[in-house]
Amino acid sequence: MTFEATSDTLAPLSFTAEQLDSAAAKCVALQQSGRELHSKRPFAALLLSPDNETVLISSLSLSHVRHAECEVARNAADNYDWNYLAKCTMVSTWEPCAMCAGTIYWAHIGRLVYLASEKTLQELIGAGNVENLTLDLPCRAVFAAGQTPVEVSGPLKAEGWEQKLVFSLARKNKIALPDLPHFQSPDALAARYDRFDNLDDFLNIHYANMSVLITEDDFYELVWYYVLAAHADGVHHAEVFFDPQSHTPRGVPIASVTRGYKRALDRAESELEVTSCLIMCFLRHLPVASAEATFDSVNDFIRDGSIHAVGLDSSEVEFPPELFTDVFQKAKEVGLRHAERIDHGIRLVEDQGLLKEIAAKGTLLTICPLSNVYLRTVKSIASLPLREFLDSGVQFSLNSDDPAYFGDGILNNYCAVQEAFGFSIDDWKTIAISGVRGSWIGDERKRVLLEKIADVAGSFKSVA
Ligand SMILES: [Zn+2]
């Protein structure tokens, strides 16, 4: 069976982040109270109305044949209209068993969100447990055999959203992924990221992954899931790089890319209070004329504020930045930020004169620790000159570079640095403040973020 490979375990886009959090919290609370107050088994399910918020019915697990999910589904079918239920969502703490999935199907409930998988449950309680002889049949297999659709999201706490998105968009856009072992499932793809043989090997996989991004909604979805992951890592502000030239040669209009990104980032600001700037990068290995054409095609998006800055990406060795002076000059003329910071910049430590100059100027270095290790720029995190930079007053921020590929998001980068350096709370305060000061957000937002940093640093001092 290949349901694992085709399972879409991403949160439903029709839910706001808050609605999803709230539904999950209600379900977990119900399960907990059932256990503590009524000595029920730890399973709970509830039914949300089409507003994604109102709880219509809920249930605990009542017996070995009256599971929480099928109790809710039966009650729902008895009390609500068949067509109305197609617009409702069942939320359950665990993946429904085959019996419950069948009942959900017959009740005509349109969407299911579950928090943890049947497989995880089995691992947790062990095989042959007479209390719960789990039925090893994924609920998606049951729904796939039906005649009306049930949209499934879960398990919600799953890692690896990036690989899952590759498969779900490939399915939606009917794009054939390469017939290779690592393109058989999201897990196989994720495992492959641990051992890129060389740059070409990485790029082959990267291009195959990108080929599934076609419509504005695809780019929206990609950025929205990125933002959810960044938010979970504690990100308050993100300055995101994107390369339109990776998509336009495939026939994807630049407007689809930019609008998709912008919509997701706007949603992040309104729902999650995560602010952002979008930095459009030119690919250095492509002709300068291609960069010029790209720049000329985004006039509208510069004017409406969607794009804040320009930068350079891709191979450095044969393609010096001087090639792009003219297009950067144009960007400057229309008020875009550019070339005010140094990305990476870790070799600055090799030139003490320049290091002093950069420190005096207050120029920000944007350092991506795990990326430097993955791409073998340094042997280990500990060999990054972070201590030297702090001691000589060079301002730097810590960032994630291609988080889907190079060691995950920002939190992993922060943790790896802390493990290697054991920085004090004052060191971290300096790093965080440098990042905010060197960012491209307005003064008011900077003030808010600096205040948050002071609060957090203060709370650490008081317990120390
Ligand atoms: Zn069940």
Image (cartoon, rainbow, N blue to C red):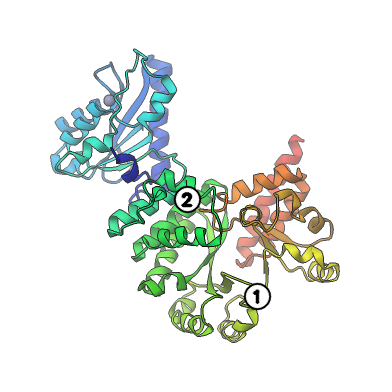
SS at mark 2? helix
Of the residues shown, which amino acid type is indicated by label 1? Ala
Can residue 18 be seen in this snapshot? no
Which sits in the foreground, 143 or 212? 212
* Residue holding disc 1: 339
Q: Quadrant of residue 92?
A: top left
**Residue at point 29%, 33% (across, down):** 138
**Residue 255: % across, % down:** 39, 73
Q: Quadrant of residue 142?
A: top left
**Residue 426: % across, % down:** 78, 48
Neighbours of disc 1 within 10 Å: few (<14), some (14-19), many (20+): few
* Residue holding disc 2: 228
Indicate which label's residue lies in the foreground, 1 or 2: 1
The quarter of the rendering in which ligand 1 is drawn is top left
Can residue 337 be seen in this snapshot? yes
Of the residues shown, which amino acid type is indicated by label 2? Leu
Q: How many marks?
A: 2
Quadrant where the image shows the N terminus: top left
**Residue 114: % across, % down:** 35, 36
Q: Tell me if residue 56 comes above or below residue 288 in the rendering.
A: above
**Residue at point 35%, 48% (across, down):** 15
Quadrant where the image shows the C terminus: top right
Q: Quadrant of residue 402?
A: bottom right
Q: Tell me if residue 220 comes above or below residue 283 in the rendering.
A: above
Q: Is residue 137 left or right of residue 380?
A: left
